[in-house]
Amino acid sequence: MKTIYIMQKEIRESVLTPKGFLWYILTSIILSVLSYLFLTNSELSLLDQGQMLYMIMNFVTALGILIGLIFGADAFAGEIERGTLESLLLSPVNKTEVAMGKLGAALINWGIIFAISLPYLFVVCKGGQNLLFGIVYLAILGTLLTITFSAFSMGLSARIKSMKNSLIISFFIFLLAGSPIFLSAALRGTWFGRILDLINPFADAINTFDSVVIDNQGFGYQTGRVAIICGYTLLSLWFLKRSVSRLEM
């Protein structure tokens, strides 16, 4: 119940705010533009439904990671700079419950982003055979990646205690995570690209999306990448717990 209380507090202060709604409006605008281009542009409209679905899934996942990192960076460093951490820790909740409540709010935020994306996925894919599988994988892997990056950023925020530095490091992590999108197919085929794909949880997610919605491959082909993502999720949760346990007022 204490964790739920913290989560409700974070939702009121971070999600249900003008800044939170701005993210949702921007998400809708960008998805609307992408969908319009996919359906009307003479070149982009030549893409098959699987490729369109794959590209939107990549964007939604990247956006979920970015917002999770921003929420995480503010989680403890922002409380310290606003002078509200002491009163929060003096309330009848322990540090772990505070962290889990903030993480729960980040997941609610991801859930809203995911819900916003659903109509666009249906419109672009138009009932394609891989649509439902794509949605299921987006929901599962998007949730795992949101937990992973949000928890890591929160742990970093608790350790650094500086909102500015936490945001800078979090943005750098986002660029590293998103690097596979910007690498050419030739570079991704090199030993460096293959290693980067293997150790990067976001790369594992987009490769899974590619395998599911474009190559029509079953779950047996995805187990290795999904296992790696789950491993990162557990490691990030451990890092968050360790960081919060050392947090002092």
Image (cartoon, helix red, strand yellow):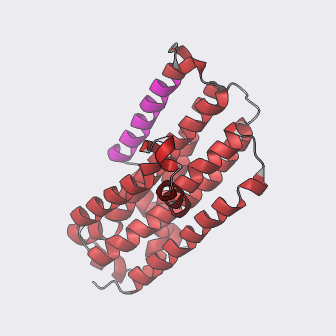
Quarter holding residue 89: bottom left
Q: Where's residue 136, x and y in %?
A: 69, 47
Residue at coordinates 55% horizontally, 50% vertically from top-left?
111
Residue at coordinates 33% horizontally, 63% vertically from top-left?
73
The span shown in magenta is: 18-36
Quarter of the picture holding the C terminus = bottom left
Q: Where's residue 133, x and y in %?
A: 73, 43
- Asked whether the viewer can see residue 140, the reply is yes
User: Magenta includes 92?
Assistant: no
Q: Where's residue 142, x and y in %?
A: 57, 53
Nearest the camera: 226 or 36? 226
Compared across the picture, whether 93 is left or right of 133 comes to: left
Q: Main secondary structure of the magenta part?
A: helix
Nearest the camera: 106 or 179? 179
- Asked whether the viewer can see residue 142, the reply is no
Residue at coordinates 42% horizontally, 43% vertically from top-left?
182
Quarter of the picture holding the N terminus = bottom right
Residue at coordinates 41% horizontally, 52% vertically from top-left?
67
Q: Where's residue 153, x and y in %?
A: 39, 66
How many tags in the picture?
0
Compared across the picture, whether 36 is left or right of 135 comes to: left
Compared across the picture, whether 193 is left or right of 168 comes to: right
User: Magenta includes 30?
Assistant: yes
| 226 to 52, vertically: above or below | below
